[in-house]
Structures are given as C-alpha cells and as structure tokens.
Image (cartoon, rainbow, N blue to C red):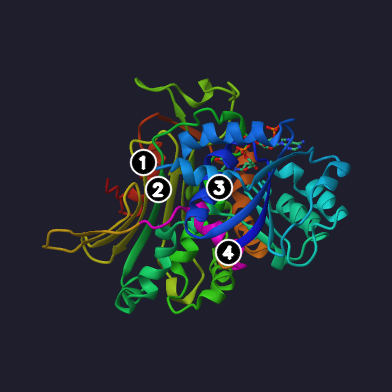
Amino acid sequence: MQECHFILLGATGDLALRKIFPALYRASLSGLKPTITACARSPLSTQEFIRHLSIKAKEYVKDLDPTAWESFTTYVSYTPLDLTKTKDFQALKATHPNTIIYFSIAPEFFAKACQNLAAVGLNAPGVKIVLEKPLGTNLASCQEICRQISQHFKEEQIYRIDHYLGKQSVQNLFYLRANNPFLAGLLGASYLDHVQISVLETLGVESRGGFYDPMGALRDMLQNHMLQMLALATMPANTPIEDMRQVKLEMLKSLKPLNEESLKTQVVRGQYSASQNFKGYKQEEQVSPNSQTETFVALKLELDHPNWQGVPFYLRTGKRMGASLVQVVFVFKGPTQTLVYTLQPQCSLKLQLQGMGALKSALDAGMDAYERLILEVVAGNQALFNHQNELEAAWSFIDPILESWQKGLTPLLSYPAGGFGPEAAFALLSKDNRAWITHV
Ligand code: NAP
C-alpha cells in the first residue's frame, strides 16, 4: 500500500467528478491509499459532499464495486474554501510527507492559490502541485502564469498535465519505434514521404461553449496535445525515459516557424455551420452568434532536424467531423504504402504495403490516462508532464498563427457540421499531390 495525501482544489467541478475521483478510486483498487481533502467554494459538509460524489460515481465509474467505493470514501473529507481568501487556507494541513495538491480550477486562480498555499506553508519541499491546462492563451500569458507560480514552487514540485501523455496509446508513438529498431529505421526521412496527424471529433462543443469559445481548436487541441504527439512520434528512438522531456523540447524547438507567406498558404481555419442533422457553431449554447472562433484547423509544418529533413507533417483537428478518430499516418515514398497508427476509437496498427492486403493488429490502450498520471505524481516521476520550456516552445510556434488570424490574414471558412472540414483543408494536400488518409 502506497500512502499519500491528496488535496483536490475544485473538487465539486466537472473534471474532478468525472475524471479525477474515478481515477483515484481505481488507483486505490490497485494499491494506492490516498487520504483526500476535497476543497471547493460550496458550503457542504463532508457527508453532503460524499453523498454528491457517490451519485456522480455511479455515472462516471465503470464497474463500481459498492463495498470498495464505501471504503474509498472513508478517506475523503471536505473543506469549504474560497481560493481568494488566505484565511480559508488555514484549515489545510499536509498530513503526509507525500502531499499532492491538484489544481482542478480555472487558471485565473492559479497564482492566488499558490500564494495562499505558501502563506500556510503548503509549498514546503516535497509538496507537489498538479496543474490542469490551459496554462495561458499565448506565449506571454503562459510565461506570466509560470512566473507567478515559480515565486512559490520550484520546477521539481510542479506537474503540468497534458492528459494525452498519460495515454498508453500516445506513449506508444515513441515506444513503437524505441522497442522495434527496424521501424525506427523506416519511420524517418529516408523512407517517408510525409506524416499526417488527425484528431477528429464527431461531437460539437456540447454544453462547454462558454469554455470553448474563447479558446478554439488551435489552443484547445493543437498547441498542446497534437504538438506533444508530434514530438513523441519524431524524437530519436533511443532516447532514455529520463531524457524524454529534454528531447521533446528539442523536437518542439525544431518546428520551423511559419513565415508571412506560409501563414497564409499552410494554415486553414474553419468553423462548422448548420447542416441537415446539426446546428451550426454560432447557434450553440453559450457561443456568441458572431463568434470568429475556429472549430477546425489544418496546417502543414516541417522540422528543422537532421532526422526529418524534407518530411512535411500535415496536422488537422476539428469538431463536428464525419468521424471520431485519433490517427497518425506514416506515408512512405512510392505508391500506397502506409503505416496507420490509430489511437482512438480502438488502438491499432495497420501496415498497408503495395500488392498485399493490409496487416492489422489490435493493441491494448492500457490504463486510464488520469490514473496513470496520478500514480506518476505519487511516485515523483515528472517524465510524463510538461516542462515550462516545452509549453513556451509550443507557444512560440503557435503565437504567429494567432497573430496572423487577429490581423485577419487567414479567412475563417465554414464547413458543414458532420463533414471533414473546409475545401481548403483538402487543397492543402492536393496542391502537393497528396490526400488526407482517413482509416475509420
Ligand atoms: P468547473 O466545473 O467550472 O469547476 C470549477 C471548480 O472550481 C468548482 O469546484 C468550483 O467550486 C471551484 N471554484 C470556482 N471558484 C472558486 C473559488 N473562488 N474558490 C474555490 N473554489 C472555486 O470546471 P472544470 O470543468 O472542472 O475545470 C476545472 C479546470 O480544469 C479548468 O481549468 C479547466 O480548463 C480544466 N480542464 C477541464 C476539463 C474538463 O473536461 N472539464 C478538461 C481539461 C482541463 P464550486 O462549484 O463549489 O463553486
């Protein structure tokens, strides 16, 4: 049994109830013994909170064992706390040397929460903090949040979550090549024509329009999850796990900045419009009827790295697409030879060679991402979390795109909900004599 004290800020929120508590429960079944202090603004007693949590658990925890759940909740207590009030933090105490404070709260509270935690000594060496995205909306705001946090916590205490990095299927982008040296040889500039990365969702913004509208697809998906996938898929296959963050950073720094011309010709932004079956983005709840937010982005980029010279990468992500899919397609030089690594809906690897039927193998997607990441924090292993420098490198690549959009240099194109993006996204590849590959 591994013990720890888990202080969860934002415990009544959607993320905490839907992802974090279920992950803590599953971790408790496999040997973790967390004492949990749940904190939020709502004035609840521990009993009332656990009643609410248990109702949500029935909805969000698969195969809930009522006896194990009851035993898990005996270690949960609730402390009402306003993040902006220093005196409220006096009720918090670190009750174990392995204390983890999880910020499941809006980033605008991060600095104040850090300051208040420090005021009651909850930034002592050994205390770890876990930060949810988004950390900033551009390079300057990311640096500012990180600066404020660093006044109270050292880098080795900070675990910045990108939950994609907790997915076994995402880590396999690296392990596929690391564990199979013949593939590492094939998946590089000598044999590849290009690489495609797609993250497509059939869902629209659902009830989260208020959160999504100020963000958009570029910030919500591409800046973080997709650039991290790209870094994992391209870093040298012999990278030791302890060097992973440093080498991912090198890959992110090798992204060739888009110039004035390529910002116009290599980036497509789109927004879904009403179709027969779906309403348009502007008609969604909590979305401005004049919204200029993109729900789709496609772009072509290259890496300035010896292993990847001359290999273009095409990335696309969108909501209300014709399929739900997370896929990386390695397209070899020569006709119709591909290695398709599908991460969602089912993890699989498909090799398509000329003159042969496709060879397809199903893969195990592994443990839930949040459970894995929580266990990594408990163990004090930062490899699967973003270093501040990685975030900054990613924002440095994204900032010029955002700025060109703000100047109106790239039009916001509409695409019918349920399709695969605006026509320009197809032209992005067809003008290079290539086409998107979508293996559903
Ligand atoms: P949410 O449902 O709005 O929950 C916010 C939580 O913060 C609630 O527990 C709320 O407590 C608490 N809170 C708000 N103001 C407070 C204050 N002044 N003092 C103390 N507590 C306060 O948000 P969420 O969806 O869980 O998201 C939380 C964070 O995770 C956000 O940064 C979000 O961007 C990020 N995130 C969310 C998701 C997701 O799927 N939901 C995914 C990735 C990242 P009361 O309810 O008691 O007021």
Decide if ligand 1 comes within 8 Å of the CB at mark 2. Answer: no
Q: CA distance from mark 2 to mark 4?
A: 51 Å
Task: Return the disc, 2 or 3, that comes first in the chain's sequence.
Answer: 3
Which is in the foreground here, disc 3 or disc 1?
3
Which residue corresponds to mark 3? 72
Of 267 and 418, nearer the camera is 418
Please state the extent of the stretch shown in magenta in the rendering. 365-381
Asked whether the viewer can see residue 4, the reply is yes
Which residue corresponds to mark 4? 2
Label 1 neighbour load within 10 Å: few <14, some 14-19, many 20+: some
Q: Position of residue 47 (x, y in %)?
A: 66, 34
Of 198 and 238, nearer the camera is 238
Which amino acid is tagged 1? Ser
Which residue corresponds to mark 2? 428
Which amino acid is tagged 4? Gln
Q: CA distance from mark 3 to mark 4?
A: 14 Å
Whether the magenta-drawn stretch holds residue 374 is answered as: yes
Q: Which mark is residue 71?
A: none
Residue at 47% over, 65% down? 232
Quarter of image, ligand 1: top right
Q: CA distance from mark 3 to mark 1?
A: 34 Å
Q: Is residue 263 left or right of residue 403?
A: left
In the figure, residue 361 lies in which quadrant? bottom left
Q: CA distance from mark 2 to mark 3?
A: 52 Å
Decide if ligand 1 comes within 8 Å of the CB at mark 4. Answer: no
Task: Return the disc, 2 or 4, that comes first in the chain's sequence.
Answer: 4
Which residue corresponds to mark 1? 324
Residue at 31% over, 53% down? 434
Which is in the foreground here, disc 1 or disc 4?
4
Q: Position of residue 96 (x, y in %)?
A: 71, 61
Q: Is residue 220 left or right of residue 140?
A: left
